Amino acid sequence: MIDIKLIRLITGEEIVAEVVDWKNGILTVKNGLVVIPHQDQVGFAPWATVIDPEFPEIALDMKHVIYSVAVAPQVVKQYEKIFGNNIITPDKQLIL
């Protein structure tokens, strides 16, 4: 199972990304999306758009991270749709 977090940086950016590793004061992520607030909703756009796809991991020094928290289940589902990380199963329905 992948570990998807909302990460707020000291620049004010909020990103949703897959945490690859977290040790020695370095948070390593990949497949980052920047959160874009819009009225009563949020949207997502690619973050770090020009990195080499052969090396998708980004190391963040923790002194540049304000917080890292779990995201809502619907955000995880949307993230998985965007990146195709898991098989998406339909919502449970009753058979009548």
Image (cartoon, rainbow, N blue to C red):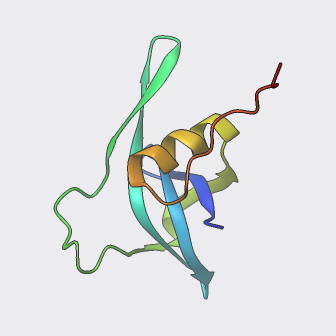
Tell me if 22 is positioned left or right of 40 in this view. Answer: right
Number of callouts? 0
Residue at 54% over, 61% down? 65
Q: Is residue 73 above or below residue 40?
A: below
Residue at 60% over, 55% down? 5
Q: Among all residues in the image, which is located at the extreme top?
A: 39
Residue at 47% over, 69% down? 29
Q: Is residue 52 above or below residue 72?
A: below
Foreground residue among 67 and 44 = 44
Residue at 21% over, 56% down? 49
Q: Position of residue 94 (x, y in %)?
A: 82, 25
Residue 77, picture quadrant: top right
Image quarter (top left, top right, bottom left or bottom right) of the N terminus: bottom right
Q: Position of residue 22 (x, y in %)?
A: 61, 79
| Residue 80 visible here | yes
Tell me if 20 is positioned left or right of 1 in this view. Answer: left
Image quarter (top left, top right, bottom left or bottom right) of the C terminus: top right
| Residue 72 visible here | no
Q: Is residue 44 above or below residue 30?
A: above
